[in-house]
Image (tube, helix red, strand yellow):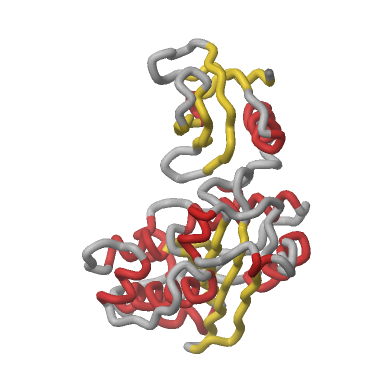
């Protein structure tokens, strides 16, 4: 879908629905971890017109350390829906919207995996990040979502619950828009954000890259793998790793893996992985 970037920011919701969304997950890295709650709020013509909120049953029980973050327990997910039953509904909900998330690369990365895994097309959205935008235009002690809500007297909810964080994200985005002059257009906010958050930048499964395909296969089977890595003390030498999760990020795509040399969890940047060999 093509978006008219000359639409005035002050009239944005008259032209396109604004959807803010958030995910709660079973861990920090896609593939290794899964979305366990998905929430979104749709804003059009200056008001909330629709809500989306669903708990999702993961394939493995949650760990206590993760439960402490969001308060979602295994018992709460016993009768929850599975993502395969909800992902199309979510794609339909956000279709045609200006899509917002706080630290959007994290949420987009998780959702993109589920879209691809269910053989769906990426939705037509213009993706923005309220964290990146707030750093550019909103003064704050830090730019965590709850800090911004508190210091700018915005309406928040229960931290680390998907719908409440989505609504808080919407409030931060609308506050950001207020900081632009009356002549500013959608193009201006895209320019200020600087980073391209298009769905294709979060594609993993459909990439025609044998290295990534092998890494994903190893992650899903929890298998070890040998790589030649252009970094660290064993630069350009074979290094055994056990990959767990993948992050596609505007600042550099990487995998989280246990290094077989010292058994420590580390980041391995994809651009420095030159060879991959399944063990």
Q: Is residue 8 visible?
A: no
Quarter of the figure with the C terminus: top right
Q: Residue furthest top?
A: 237
Which residue sits at x=37%, y=73%? 172
Residue 248: horizontal and vertical position, in percent?
Answer: 53, 43
Image quadrant of residue 124? bottom right
Residue 97: horizontal and vertical position, in percent?
Answer: 58, 71
Of 31 and 250, which appears nearest the observer? 31
Of 156 and 186, which appears nearest the observer? 156
Residue 104: horizontal and vertical position, in percent?
Answer: 48, 58
Image quadrant of residue 190? bottom left
The relative height of residue 184 versus residue 239 in the rendered view (above or below) is: below
* Image side of residue 209 versus residue 14, left or right: right
Which residue sits at x=56%, y=66%? 72
Q: Is residue 75 visible?
A: yes
The relative height of residue 179 versus residue 135 in the rendered view (above or below) is: below
* Image side of residue 155 versus residue 253, left or right: left
Of 52 and 139, which appears nearest the observer? 52
Of 51 and 94, which appears nearest the observer? 51
Which residue sits at x=53%, y=70%? 162
Quarter of the figure with the N terminus: bottom right
Which residue sits at x=51%, y=70%? 161
């Amino acid at each position: 879908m093509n978006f008219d970037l000359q639409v005035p920011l002050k009239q944005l919701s008259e032209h396109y629905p604004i959807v803010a969304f958030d995910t709660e997950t079973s861990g920090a890295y896609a593939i290794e971890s899964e979305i366990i709650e998905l929430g979104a709020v749709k804003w059009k013509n200056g008001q909330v017109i629709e809500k989306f909120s669903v708990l999702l049953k993961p394939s493995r029980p949650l760990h206590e350390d993760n439960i402490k973050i969001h308060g979602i327990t295994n018992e709460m997910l016993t009768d929850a829906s599975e993502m395969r039953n909800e992902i199309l509904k979510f794609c339909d909900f956000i279709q045609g919207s200006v899509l917002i998330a706080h630290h959007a690369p994290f949420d987009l990365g998780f959702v993109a995996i589920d879209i691809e895994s269910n053989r769906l097309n990426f939705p037509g959205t213009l993706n923005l990040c309220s964290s990146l935008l707030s750093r550019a235009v909103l003064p704050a002690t830090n730019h965590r979502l709850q800090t911004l809500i508190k210091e700018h007297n915005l309406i928040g909810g229960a931290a680390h619950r998907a719908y409440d964080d989505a609504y808080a994200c919407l409030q931060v985005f609308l506050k950001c828009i207020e900081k632009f002059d009356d002549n500013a257009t959608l193009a201006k906010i895209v320019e200020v954000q600087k980073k391209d958050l298009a769905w294709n930048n979060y594609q993993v499964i459909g990439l025609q890259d044998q290295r990534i395909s092998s890494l994903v296969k190893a992650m899903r089977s929890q298998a070890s793998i040998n790589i030649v890595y252009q970094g660290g003390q064993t630069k350009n030498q074979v290094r055994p790793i056990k990959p767990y999760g993948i992050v596609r990020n505007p600042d550099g795509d990487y995998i989280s893996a246990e290094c077989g040399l010292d058994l420590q969890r580390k980041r391995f940047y994809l651009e420095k992985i030159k060879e991959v060999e399944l063990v």
